[in-house]
Image (cartoon, grey):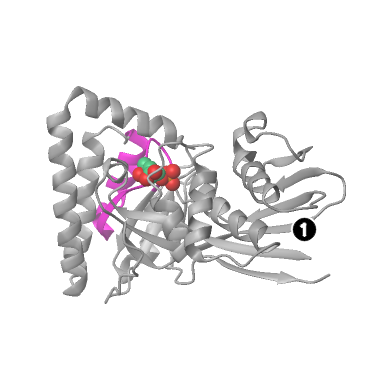
Amino acid sequence: MKSIASAPGKIILFGEHFVVHGTKAILAAIDKRVTVTSTFAENKTIKVNSQLGTIEVPISSSHEEVKSEFRPFVYLANKIINSEQNVSGLEITIDSDIPIGVGLGSSSACCVAAAASISELFNELSSEEILKMSIEAEKTIFPDTSGADCTVCTYGGMIEYPSVEKIDNTFDLNLLIANSMIPHNTKNSVEKVNKFKENDEERFSQLCDLETKLIDEVITAMKNNDVTTFGLKMSENQKYLEEIQISNDTLRDMINSLKEISLGTKITGAGDGGCIITLVKDENMDKVPALLPKDKEYFSAKIDTKGVVWSTIEE
Ligand code: PMV
């Protein structure tokens, strides 16, 4: 039997970093996906094949013994195998069209798709169970995760985390994602923000309050079909991200170069590299190539509404 699951990548529209400290955040799943295929194997090993390489370890190996990018898969395989009898081995294959390490949820989508794919070899799980397992798996690489990324990759659509209810946005968001091509490390950026907080608890708490207020205003703007305010709030959110120091010159240059054609632009995800998102007016989409440096990639993002999906095939 073969079990195939796929999960979408994501963008954070508002609230990254502050969400780790308990504020709300607005996230959306995007139309780029990771697919994880799991099959039984005969040789008492867990084998993982991905764009990042292949590993094969004895079935009882600890996830801590493998390179960090493979940890969630070995963790999930062991957790699920341990609760089942007579499993001789597993082979897990990951195919992804989500750029890696640039804030588009590649690792969360992998955890969600792997939790669904491996567990569906044995039992039908609910979305809540898949989400719970995927967050545990993500914690093997990033213990402080807010869980927001796995949540939107599981449920799809646009959500106001921690709620999983889909926001019914009244206008089409013409969102463009531009990749700085600088890989980032979420753990390091989150630690940097923790230091900022330790050094100035009072200002950090004010910023969390400002972020909460901003998100409430965004929700109202969406209800009022007010795309201009939505864009302005993106740029306002960027100011808070600048203040907590997760921006850099490359990201600022990219944001500035898109200013004349956008309603608002900000970092999405952990920052210090990775991607920016910009709300572009329809009539300006064809001006983007001339404004961004040639070494940056960009693409339009459509919102995925399906979240994680899975199926099994008898062979
Ligand atoms: O850049 P990413 O995709 O790893 O996003 C991280 C988002 C943070 O808010 C910085 C961390 C989190 O767990 O929410």
Q: Tell me the residue at 41%/30% (across/down).
A: 188
- Left or right: residue 59 compared with residue 257: right
Question: Compared to 296, does 36 lie above or below?
Answer: below
Check the picture and name the quadrant holding the N terminus: bottom right
Query: How dense is the environment of label 1, judged by Cα within 10 Å: few (below 14), some, or many (20 and up)?
Result: many
Which segment is the magenta one?
Answer: 248-275
Q: Residue lying farthest right?
A: 42
Q: Residue lying farthest top?
A: 199
Q: Write down which quadrant ligand 1 falls in.
A: top left
Give the quarter of the image for residue 157.
bottom left
- The amino acid beneath tag 1 is Thr
Q: Is residue 267 magenta?
A: yes
Percent across and percent down for residue 200 are: 17, 26
Question: Compared to 42, does 218 lie above or below?
Answer: below
Percent across and percent down for residue 187 are: 43, 33
Q: Tell me the residue at 26%/45% (across/down).
A: 22
Q: Relative to the observer, which residue lies in front, 167 or 245? A: 167
Q: Which residue is mark 1?
A: 39
Q: Relative to the observer, which residue lies in front, 23 or 127? A: 127
- Left or right: residue 315 compared with residue 252: right
Percent across and percent down for residue 139 are: 49, 40
Q: Is residue 160 magenta?
A: no
Element class at badge 1: strand
Give the quarter of the image for residue 5.
bottom right
